[in-house]
Image: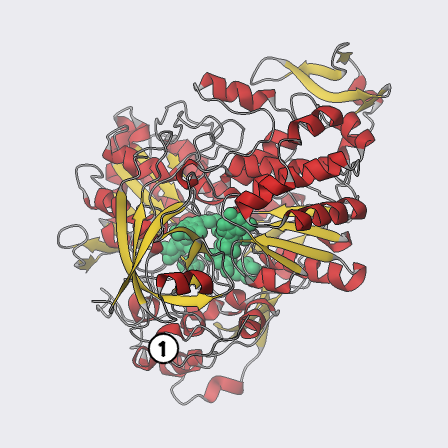
Amino acid sequence: MPTEHHSDPDLSWTLTRRDLLRIGMVAGAAVAGLGTIEIIDRAADDPAGQRKTAGTVHKIPSMCQMCTTACGIIANVRDGRLLTIEGNPADPNSRGSICAKGVAGPSILYDPSRLLHPLKRAGRRGEGRWRRISWEEAYTEIADRLRDIRRSGRPEEFAFQQGRNRSSDIVSRFLNAFGTPSAFNHRALCSLNRRAAILATIGDSDWDLGDFENSRYILNFGSNWAEAHQGHIPVAIRMMRARERNNAKIVTFDARLSNTAAVSDEWFCVKPGTDGLIALAMANVICTERLWDKEWFDTWSNHSADDYARHVRQYTPERAEAESGVPAEAIRRVAREFAEAAPRCTTICNRGSAAHRNGFYNDRAITVLNALVGNMGRVGGWCWHPMSAWDKKRIPEPGPVPEKPSARSPIAEAEDWPLANAWDNKMRVGEIVYLWIKERRQRISALMTYNCDQAWSWPEANLVREVLADEELVPFHVCIDVMPSETSNLADIVLPWTTYLERWDIDSRPPQGLVDYVGLRQPVVSPLGESKDLREIFPELARRIGDGMERYFPWRTQEEYFDEYFRAVPGGLAHMKAAGVWQDPAKKPNYAPYERILTKEELRDSEIDEKTGIVYSGTDPESGKRRAIGIMIDGVARQGFSTPSRKVEVYSQFVADKGGEAGKTISPLPIYEQIPAHRGGLGEDQLIMISFKWNVHNAHRTMQSKWLQEIVHTNPAWINSATAACLGLRHGDWIEVTSFRPRDEQVPGGDGSRFGTLRTRVHVTEGVHPSVIAISHNAGRTTGGPVASNGRDRAALPGHEAVPDKDAERIWWAGSLSVPQNDILPIYPDPVSGQQAYHDTIVSIRRIEDRA
Ligand SMILES: Nc1nc2c(c(=O)[nH]1)N[C@H]1C(S)=C(S)[C@@H](COP(=O)(O)OP(=O)(O)OC[C@H]3O[C@@H](n4cnc5c(=O)[nH]c(N)nc54)[C@H](O)[C@@H]3O)O[C@H]1N2
Ligand SMILES: Nc1nc2c(c(=O)[nH]1)N[C@H]1C(S)=C(S)[C@@H](COP(=O)(O)OP(=O)(O)OC[C@H]3O[C@@H](n4cnc5c(=O)[nH]c(N)nc54)[C@H](O)[C@@H]3O)O[C@H]1N2
Ligand code: SF4
Ligand SMILES: [Mo]
């Protein structure tokens, strides 16, 4: 691939790939533009710069939240001021490494555009006129409104919209104590299909954790772990270790030359939505050539290997080549190499395979590849951990914990997508929330939005904005945020939230080392301005709403609450404050948990079902049915998997039945279903629009960071050089991109009609599939201050006492191209699960003279 250099500021992000890699991945790397914070530093409280070298630097462990990976960090703080952030080596997941976003934390904390005072709108909603109010006034108005709703007996009319929430204990406590089930989350926009596929297949977890570090062969279907992925740093460091130590081979399928593809041994450029077909074709090769672990499959899965071989026979490598563009011979070779490395081989997938209209089946097919080669739960294989967080039995939430509400929410519990809420982990269908509010499927009297910029980050963002602006549909909107956002602009009251560097949390992520752990997020500096965290706001509101709600918030301070929470940890809160994390040294990695022999104790009063071999003991309190605890394998009672059959469900009657209940057909076996909107090929000017994440940005929360925005601040459209030649397009040309709703009768509004238009510029590259146009969604803000908006948003922030930001005048990239992809992305849920199909939209493109 040619390396391109451009002096045009709109395309100036084209640092070489090596630059981006270095910036994005190196632990604790010094990034370009770091010096800018010094200017604010001096201007703020040390005009002469005398304090620069004086005073003791305190090292305070905590947890990053620039993305949801929650790496352990150490904050270097002098005189109450955060200087730098480095990794916490004690963190078992991230092991002392952090990424460029983690390093850039101070630029968010000290961002002059931050919200620092409660605000009330002064003009029409969305007009941008605000009045600064006191917390007292804000609390009184919000509590009065919420109390009225609660007393009306329709608590569901209070809806709570959250995004990537890492404070779920306090949020659930407040909502359950209030009695509202209207908790809208973002899972369907993020990881639903992958979770649903794993839950359907193994039941034990919704999160796969390849044992990469011990692996010899890693097959990556559309996970951009070197730049993104929910386990970014913990995964990336283990991948690189596997390379070094085991000479592991990494093979990546991506529709685009991501930095992950770039650091892989091989990259195959796939047509979007075809990963499942490739995986099924690989299964076919493995079965036909008998490269499988037949014994494992026949023992531990609920479908015979011979039957699966018959099922996958229709998926030939030639058929996969025709649809995906990956050569049949390569599919055969990779399948053989993968099977040869078993059991020290694993797959990894993510939104590249999952965020599609057919993503549930894609991820099922990929997951089952592992069962076929018998690597499940093995050292170096495809693993998981039953806990996606800390051990909640051992470290329980301090009581009294409120019951789940009995009221119902037609939107949160939407029934049109049978797999969305099929498991305990309710995934909901976020992308239809505002459409359904518009269609008045549920009355909303008050909406509180938190840690989510849905007016910007969700598909049909313009519809979200239209609904939020409508005072009949949403009579009262409180937004809790750190920065002004497209969502906070449409609020009635804005509450200034603390950043992750000024607040408390108990947190941990799926453990890559397969041993659970627990971490503490603690304030490393005092909250700036009048910002407050939910942990202070919710107890205060509960007390003011009263009527018994207050009894769930007995603690006076947050420290008291965490003191109680961490009681089971040796050394308690004091240990957590000093070390940041705790892991039980006696626990062993979760390898092959299904093989565990049940103890005599467990088997007391148990019974064995003769036909299935399932071992039952007692009854399940929720369903009232017999409780399955294991399975007989060769005459021994073992733990098995947590699926209905206690085996790997290659064949899932559970999902087929769920589909049947909702009047939909769900195949019990992994299948390939071509995306209906992609059938019949593409028109001459048509392409499939996909989305991706820049390594130095996170969703929509980092565009305010001057350190990160200075590195990447634009998102031109990637188009393959051959396609560009056909369409007469040259690098840097302006194009108009017009999107279409899917032609798909199973999707709301799926009539194939024209949807939205944006104008952007072309980045011509060989690093993208010829049928694809790839646009990063990490750009295109219109609000959030001059840095976030590339100089466009210079409106004075209300109630702002922050230092005038001299850096705002030095934004050398002002006016650079930055477009909001979500304004032209139609709502497109996978009909069986509800996952938003981010990478399936058909667009047409047309060359234009310039932006105007
Ligand atoms: N830097 C950064 N890190 C992040 C985030 C961020 O915004 N920025 N967000 C965090 C969050 S919330 C999440 S959910 C994760 C998501 O992490 P990932 O799932 O790893 O990231 P995505 O960019 O959504 O998708 C991954 C890749 O899929 C490719 N792709 C698109 N269609 C196809 C296809 O059909 N097949 C294949 N094989 N590839 C395809 C895209 O080119 C992209 O490189 O990242 C987390 N980490
Ligand atoms: N087109 C397209 N759209 C996508 C995706 C895609 O691939 N393509 N990915 C989707 C995915 S996977 C997800 S998870 C969603 C995420 O979308 P969001 O949930 O909207 O993204 P966040 O970045 O978490 O931003 C939420 C809010 O958190 C605030 N915030 C909270 N704490 C802090 C803090 O300490 N610092 C800063 N700076 N801000 C804070 C930000 O101001 C912001 O308003 O986006 C989805 N949207
Ligand atoms: S991967 Fe995420 S949590 Fe870890 S340092 Fe980077 S931004 Fe922070
Ligand atoms: Mo996400």
Horizontal side, residue 787 vs residue 326: left or right = left
Q: Residue at x 62, y 42 (%)?
A: 318
- Element type at mark 1: helix
Q: Which residue sits furthest top?
A: 610
Residue 552 drawn above or below residue 455: above
- From the top left corner, tell me how far across and down residue 594 is, in percent: 76, 31
Seen from the viewer's position, the closer of residues 126 and 262 is 262
Residue 111 drawn above or below residue 498: below
Horizontal side, residue 780 vs residue 337: left or right = left
Q: What count of labels does the image hold?
A: 1
In the picture, the quarter occupied by the C terminus is bottom left
Q: Is residue 639 visible?
A: no
Q: Which quarter of the figure has residue 99?
A: bottom right
- From the top left corner, tell me how far across and down residue 10 is, in percent: 35, 73
Horizontal side, residue 600 vs residue 302: left or right = right
In the picture, the quarter occupied by the N terminus is bottom right
Q: Residue at x 37, y 24 (%)?
A: 408
Q: Which residue sits furthest left?
A: 123
What residue type is disc 1 on?
Pro
- From the top left corner, tell me how far across and down residue 817 is, in percent: 32, 68
Seen from the viewer's position, the closer of residues 805 and 98 is 98
From the image, tell me which residue sits under label 1. Answer: 9
Colour setting: secondary structure
Neighbour tally class for label 1: few under 14, some 14-19, many 20 plus, Cα within 10 Å: some
